[in-house]
Image (spheres, rainbow, N blue to C red):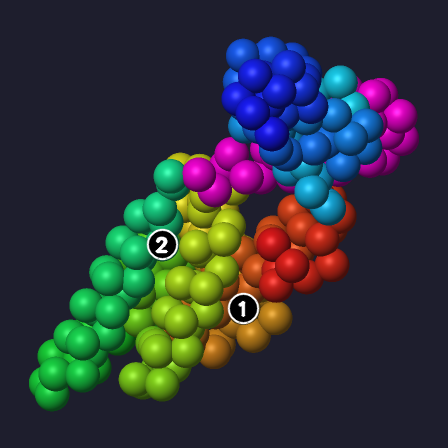
């Protein structure tokens, strides 16, 4: 085929941009489309007109799922889990201090949650409400700390980009607070340490968001 024959054959050029050479066909209408006109489909690519027709034929449920998938992708784009990393680093640092002989037990006693410490009449006339949150920073040993921080990192790197830094931090603290309140109601004389309550709250939020978006498990994100 000569150059003139090639130029006269419109099948060698994008139907929307006649001056742009291409050899890619829309998988629905089989017309030639250039890179600027291509949209990835489950099999091959489709042109803008076929994409418009395909979206017009979508059911409301399909349209809603597509919008949710697009919004989730936007949430993940360029948003590293910095709050998650900061919590892991701070909690890990406190955990290391707990392992130092002599001061480790003092740190644990100062930060653990113990329900009677909320009531001045049971705590030498002093109320210590900060203990509702400080047990998130202390743990019962290396493996307790390591497992909790691993779980926090795995959940946080998925959940924090969805919620944003401040809402993620608020959810973490509120979940930890809820865990302490639950202990105060169910077993008020039990001293408590660890971030497990906060992590369970994060996991529950991730499941709720996944269900709403049509995912069956966090692994399908």
Say if 167 sits above or below 107 in the image.
Answer: above
Question: Which residue does the numbered mark 1 point to in the structure image?
Answer: 183
Comparing marks 2 and 1, which lies closer to the viewer? 2
Callout 2: SS: helix
Callout 1: SS: helix
Q: Is residue 54 left or right of residue 96?
A: right
Residue 37 in view, yes or no? no
Question: Which residue does the numbered mark 2 point to in the structure image?
Answer: 84
Q: CA distance from mark 2 to mark 1?
A: 25 Å
Is 205 in front, or is 32?
32
Residue 31 x/y as whole percent: 74, 25
Indicate the quadrant containing the C terminus: top left, top right, bottom left or bottom right: bottom right
Say if 115 sits above or below 5 in the image.
Answer: below
Q: Residue at x 31, y 71 (%)?
A: 138
Residue 183 x/y as whole percent: 54, 68
Residue 43 in view, yes or no? yes
The furthest residue to the front:
2
Residue 145 x/y as whole percent: 34, 77
- Start-end of magenta stretch: 51-77
Q: Main secondary structure of the magenta part?
A: helix
């Amino acid at each position: 085929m000569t150059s003139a024959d090639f130029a006269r054959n419109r099948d060698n050029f994008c139907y929307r941009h006649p001056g742009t050479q291409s050899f890619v066909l829309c998988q629905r209408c089989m017309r030639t489309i250039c890179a600027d006109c291509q949209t990835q489909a489950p099999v091959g690519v489709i042109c803008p007109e076929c994409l418009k027709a395909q979206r017009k034929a979508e059911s409301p449920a399909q349209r809603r799922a597509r919008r949710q998938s697009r919004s989730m992708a936007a949430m993940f784009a360029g948003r590293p889990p910095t709050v998650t990393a900061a919590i892991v680093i701070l909690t890990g640092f406190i955990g290391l201090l707990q392992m130092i002989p002599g001061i480790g037990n003092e740190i644990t006693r100062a930060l653990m949650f113990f329900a009677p410490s909320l009531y001045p009449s049971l705590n030498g006339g002093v109320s210590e409400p900060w203990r509702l949150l400080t047990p998130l920073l202390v743990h019962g040993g290396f493996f307790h700390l390591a497992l909790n921080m691993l779980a926090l990192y795995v959940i946080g790197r998925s959940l924090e980009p969805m919620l944003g830094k401040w809402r993620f931090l608020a959810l973490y603290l509120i979940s930890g607070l809820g865990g302490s309140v639950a202990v105060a109601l169910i077993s008020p004389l039990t001293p408590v340490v660890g971030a497990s309550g906060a992590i369970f709250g994060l996991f529950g939020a991730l499941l709720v968001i996944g269900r709403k978006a049509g995912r069956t498990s966090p692994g399908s994100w």
